[in-house]
Every structure is written in C-alpha cells, then in structure tokens.
Amino acid sequence: MRSLMLCFTFAQGEIKEIYPIDLPDLDYRALSSTSENILTSLASNTYEGEHWFIPSNGSKVEVTHDNVGRLQLFGDDDPPCTLLTLHMPADGTQVVALNLHGKWWSLNDVLKTSIKSRSGLVMVQSVMERVILFLLSQIIFGVLEKPSGEEIYFSPHPMREFGKILWHNGEAVGFYTIKKKGSLCDGFTRRSYQLSVLDTVFVRTRWRRSGLALQILADFCKSLPNEEVIGISCPISPSMIKVCSKYLLMHQDQRDRLYEVEAPGGWGQRRNIWLNIQLNRSTNSEALPRFGSGCTNAKAQVRSNVQQQ
C-alpha cells in the first residue's frame, strides 16, 4: 500500500497535508533506536509496519530486510545516528523512501512543508532539518541529480555545521553550508579555518536558472557583516563562477572581500575571485585556474555510506 498521508483539518474545513518537517521534532537517539528495532524485526520476520510502498513511478517496493538500507547521518567524528532507507530491489543506491516518525515517507514528501511561513533560507537547527540537509546532499545531489559524467560527492555534514535550507513554494530546493572561522578543517589535524568559507552549495535541477544560487551567495555575504574577508571553497565550479561574476558586478563593495580558498585559508591559500575572473576573461577561459593539489572541500561517495543489512 502507499504510505498514508497525515492530514489535519483547519478552520473553514480546510484540509492540509502534514509532512515530517511539520511534526514534533525527532530525537537522534530515538531515530537510531527505532531504526535498529525495525531492522531487528525485519530480520526475525516480526515486522508489523507497512509491508509495501508505492513510489511515484507506481512500482511497488516490498519492505523487506534486503530492501532496507542503513545510512549514517553524520561522519566518523560525530556520535552515530542511523537513518533507514527503502530502496529498489535491484539497486541499493535508488532510494525511494525514508523511515521517519514510525512510517515510510517518499523523498518528495520529506522535502515538503505545509507551513507557509517556512520560506526562503532557514537556518538548520532541528533534527528533522539535519535529515533534510542529509537527504539533499547525499541522496538528491549524490545520486538522483548527480551531474552527468562527474564523480563529485559531498561528505556528510558534521552535526554542528552551520547551514541553511532554501525553501521555495513549500519545498526544500537547495542548501548551503559554512565552515566558520576558527572551526577545524578536519578531524585529523589541529588546523582551523582562518576565515569563514562557503563550503557546499546546491540547488535542485528543477529550480536552477531562477536566481536562487545568487540569493544563496548574497545571503552568505550578508550573514557575516563583521568579517573583512570571506571565502568560497575551491575548486569553484564554472556555474558558480558565473554566479559570483553576476553578484560582484552588482555589488562592487564585495569585490575585495570574496576569495577562493584552500583550507585553512592562509594568504597563500586564497585568491581574489573578482581579480581572477577578470584575468580569465582576457584568456577566454570559463573556469578559474586551479590551486595546486590538496583542496579540502571534502567529497565522498554516498554509496560507501549505504550499508545493506
């Protein structure tokens, strides 16, 4: 059967669909314990939940031990937190649903909200917002909307990483995250960022070319008014270079402030984006020349985080 939709009746008989983000917030421990209980019950054939799920393409997927995968919400430096996924029988990377609040939800429903005030760029604070950030970065970008021919993936964001989700017409359509000045570059060294850096940015395919990436860049720059210089993690994609160029054409006061940065961002590891755009125009190049090897805008394959149970 299709996962049941939760609905509430409001004044004047209005009925609204309720999505996971609209429900009382989850707890990391409860999320993990529920996931483990479901896996145990599936393995012992005592599972009492929904036995079938129907994705939007209409093909039924049975909820079995073989079709359920376990994802770790965060990296190795954070406490473990398990999220259950339901995937197509023939392909463990083709996730069709997540288990939240004791039921299976389609990916599209997890990314929706019925609360009209949830709009624009909203800071990630709740557990459910962390789940949505993970879904956008690891499953939507990492698998379903992965750029053709590219093997680039975002590593799972740390539990306390600063981020914002972009809500548009009731849907989560993108996000960005920041490595704040003073935060550690990784869990293996004591190096810390010497300036705040826009580390990951993503806008879903359907909503591109509508000015949303420009909105994200503007929000990032405005959110750090007291920092003289700020950065964007290298390497910057050609599409993001175009966004930077458009933004800096409109905001001349930001031209001396925005740098492409290799961690930890010392003066030898940063270069002015506007200056390099101008230099590249003289050579008819769309991409900024790369730094030497070692850029630390960490990428990892989401497939390595999916553990078949």
Image: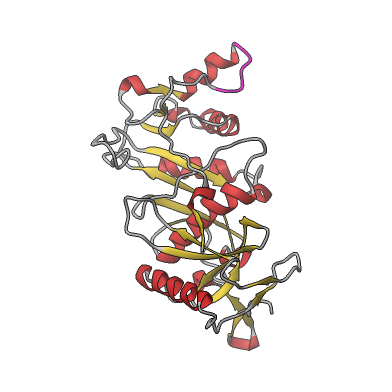
Answer above or below: position of 114 versus 195. Answer: below
Which residue occupies 66% across, 35% down? Answer: 149
Q: Which residues are magenta?
A: 283-287
Q: Is residue 284 magenta?
A: yes
Residue situated furthest front in the rendering: 44
Q: Main secondary structure of the magenta part?
A: loop
Q: Quadrant of residue 1?
A: bottom right
* Residue 109 position within the rendered picture, expressed as x and y whole percent measured from the top left: 61, 67
Which residue occupies 40% across, 54% down? Answer: 74
Res. 73 in view: yes
Left or right: residue 115 compared with residue 26: right
Total numbered labels: 0
Which residue occupies 49% across, 21% down? Answer: 290
Q: Quadrant of residue 7?
A: bottom right
Viewer-closest of 287 and 167: 287
Residue situated furthest left in the rendering: 190
Res. 174 in view: no
* Residue 131 position within the rendered picture, expressed as x and y whole percent measured from the top left: 47, 61
Answer above or below: position of 166 versus 191. Answer: below
* Residue 172 position within the rendered picture, expressed as x and y whole percent measured from the top left: 56, 58
